[in-house]
Image (cartoon, rainbow, N blue to C red):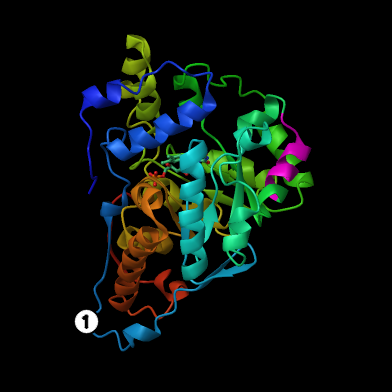
Amino acid sequence: MVENVKTPATVTKLKRGLDGDIEQRKKDHIEIILSGAARHTEGNGFDALSFVHNALPELDFNEIDLSTTFLGKTLKLPYLASSMTGGPDQGGVINRNIAEAAQAMGFAMGVGSQRIALGGGSGHGLNRDIRRVAPDIALYANLGAVQFVQGMNVDDARRAVDAISADALILHLNPLQEVLQQGGDVNWKGVLAAMEMVCRHVGVPVIAKEVGAGISVDVAKRLADIGVAAIDVSGSGGSSWAAVEGLRRADAQGQSLGEIFRNWGLPTAHCLHAVHKALPAMPLIASGGIRDGLDGAKAIRLGANLVGQAGALLRAATLSTEQVIAHVAVWEKALRVACFCTASQNVNVLRQAPIDRLVFDP
Ligand SMILES: Cc1cc2nc3c(=O)[nH]c(=O)nc-3n(C[C@H](O)[C@H](O)[C@H](O)COP(=O)(O)O)c2cc1C
C-alpha cells in the first residue's frame, strides 16, 4: 500500500523546470515515486501464474535454504535492492540504510547512477562508506548506457566501480525516460557498441538493465552477444518513468506524453519468462513492480536468479535501516512460505515447482 499519497496539486508543485539541475531532478524523482502518482496502472504479469499448493510438503519450514550464488558471490537471500539515485542529502541516507540492512541480511545492493558523483558533484554516499558498513555484500555500480555515446569512457566506468569497490557494473537502458525528459539524451546511435567496449575492458561483470519498460528477447540476445554477464529485465507493472517525467514537465505536451506512455513496456513476468526461454544460461534479475516475496517466488520459478525492488523499498529506505530490515523480512518470509507450500527446500527446487496456471505462455 502506498502511504502519504499526494494529490495531483501537490505533485504539480514539483514541476520546477530545472532540468539542467540533475540533483534537483533526482530529488523530484524520489518525491514523485513516494507520492504514488507515477505507477503503471497495469500489472507486472505475475497474477497470471499460480503454484500448485502442496498439502504434504514433508519439510521443516525452518530448514528452508534461500541462499543463492550470483556472479560468483553467495547471497543469503535472492533479493536485490535495485538502483535508486537520490539528491545529495537523501542519496546518502538511502544508501546507508540499504547497505546496513543488506549486510545484516545478506542481500545484494545496486547503487543509483554515479553520473553526478563522477562529474565531481557531491558523493551521495557513493564512496567507500558503503563498503565500510557493508564489507560482505554483493554491490553493483551504476551508470547510464547512453552516457557512453555522450562522452563517458571505460575509465569513467572503472572509476565508478572503484569508487564503491563494486563487484559488478550495472549499465541502465532508459530510452523511454530520456525521450520524455526535458533535455534528455535522445541520440542512442552506437549505444550497443559502446556497451561492448565497457564489457570488454571494465574488469568486472557488466549487468544490463532497463528501468521499468522491460528487455525483449531480441534485445537480450544482442546484449548476450556483446558479453553482458547478466540481465535485469526491469519490466512494467511498478514505477513508470514515463509518468515520472510527465509529472515533472511544466508544458502540456510533455505532461500528455507522460500519460500516453504511462503503461508502455513489457510486463516483468512476460519478458522474464520469454528471455529465460530464449537464453536459459543467462543469469537474470527480475525487477519492475515486484510487490512482495510471492511475486519473488514466481519470478524465481520463471527463471530469475535474483529479484529486485526499487519503488516498493523506497519509503523504508528513506526512514531507517530497521525499516529496510522489516520490509525485506516480510519479503523473505513470503518467499519462504511459497517454498514451504510448494515443498521446495531451496530456491533450486522452487525453480521446478509445479505451476497450476500460466495464462500468458506464448
Ligand atoms: C527513486 C528511484 C531512482 C532510480 N534511479 C535509478 C538509477 O539511478 N539507475 C537505474 O538503473 N535505475 C534507477 N531506478 C530504476 C529502478 O532501479 C527500477 O529499475 C525501476 O524503478 C523498476 O522497479 P520498481 O517497479 O520496483 O520501482 C530508480 C528507481 C527509483 C524508484
Residue 338 horizontal/vertical position (percent): 31, 71
Find residue 321 and report its image quarter.
bottom left
Find residue 193 and report its image quarter.
top right
**Label 1: few (<14), some or many (≥20) within 10 Å?**
few
Measuring 35% from the left and 11% from the top, which residue is drawn there?
Answer: 253
Residue 186 horizontal/vertical position (percent): 56, 19
Numbered marks: total: 1
Element at label 1: loop
Residue 158 magenta-highlighted: yes
Magenta span of residues: 152-161
Residue 358 magenta-highlighted: no
Q: Is residue 275 left or right of residue 291?
A: right
Measuring 45% from the left and 45% from the top, which residue is drawn there?
Answer: 234
Residue 80 horizontal/vertical position (percent): 48, 57
Is residue 174 or residue 110 the one in the foreground?
110
Q: Is residue 5 left or right of residue 325?
A: left
Residue 306 horizontal/vertical position (percent): 49, 60
Q: Is residue 148 left or right of residue 283?
A: right
Is residue 53 or residue 154 the one in the foreground?
154
**In the depicted structure, whether residue 295 falls above or below residue 212:** below
From where the camera sits, is residue 156 visible? yes
**In the depicted structure, whether residue 7 falls above or below residue 317:** above
Q: Quadrant of ligand 1?
A: top left
**In the depicted structure, whether residue 51 falls above or below residue 112:** below
Measuring 33% from the left and 29% from the top, which residue is drawn there?
Answer: 262
Helix, strand or loop: magenta stretch = helix
Q: Which residue is mark 1?
A: 55
From where the camera sits, is residue 206 visible? no
Q: Is residue 354 left or right of residue 307?
A: left
Badge 1 amino acid: Ala
